Amino acid sequence: MNGSSINIGAIIALDTTNRKLARTAIELAVEDVNRNTSVLNGTILNIHIRDSKHDALTGASAALELIRKGCVSIVGPQTSVVAEFVGYLGVAAHVPVVTFGATNPSLSMHRYPYFIRTVPNDKMQMRAIAKLVDLYRWRDVALVYDDMGTGAVPAITDALREVEANIVLKAAVPPQANVSSMRKLLEDELMGLESRVFIVHMHDDLALMLFSEASK
């Protein structure tokens, strides 16, 4: 294999700070591997990065393009919604998909044998949150989530049931939410609740918008 090269792909949403950091980390990792010729016996990695734009169809289209380029594996995407589409394509093409951010428990190797997750799924995280709720004896909580948290809803529901806590409201925030719609959610649905405990599970940019409007 000496002197040969391998194409690998990466699908990342590049419109936020965390995703830009992810791209930098992937590129630096590839540079490290290519610099040390003993790692792959002189084989060079060629990285091809595509932007999913948080959209499942865009992510699936990017995956198809990378597979056609001959990529032997795909890193990402971070979100479960996009990962489900890409994971299905990975199974069909026998191309491993390695995610460091998709946490939906339904994305299992049982359903997607070429799907590899490097982070714990939502069940583990939600059990920890439920233990915190139980520690402070909170009995009523509200859940605010976007498409990233879709898979977390059944997980947190089950975890809270185990500690005898109730979800009094499940508020879904669309990915295209803006300041106006976020303020409307706060004023019309959240401010009038008797519960003052809110579990927020969403992308960092939407969460920052929510907290910013809440502080006002």
Image (tube, rainbow, N blue to C red):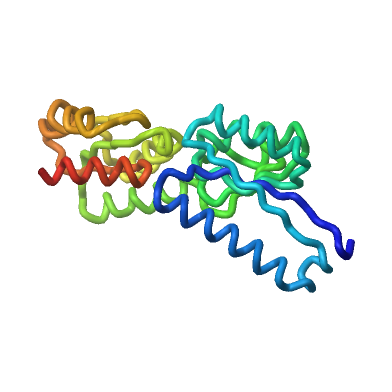
Viewed as shown, does residue 61 lie left or right of 124? right
Viewed as shown, does residue 155 lie left or right of 113? left
Give the answer, above or below, for where 13 lies relative to 168. Answer: below
Percent position (x, y) of residue 184?
17, 27
Residue 170 appears anywhere in the view: no
Residue 73 appears anywhere in the view: yes
| Front-lying residue, 165 or 27 | 27
Q: Choose top left, top right, bottom left or bottom right for residue 57.
A: top right
Percent position (x, y) of residue 154?
42, 34
Quadrant of the frame with the N terminus: bottom right
Give the answer, above or below, for where 17 lies relative to 105. Answer: below
Q: How many marks?
A: 0
Percent position (x, y) of residue 216?
10, 43
Residue plotted at (71% across, 40% down): 113
Viewed as shown, does residue 12 lie left or right of 37? left
Residue plotted at (38% across, 40% down): 156
Q: Choose top left, top right, bottom left or bottom right for residue 196.
A: top left
Residue plotted at (53% across, 54% down): 23
Percent position (x, y) of residue 182?
22, 32
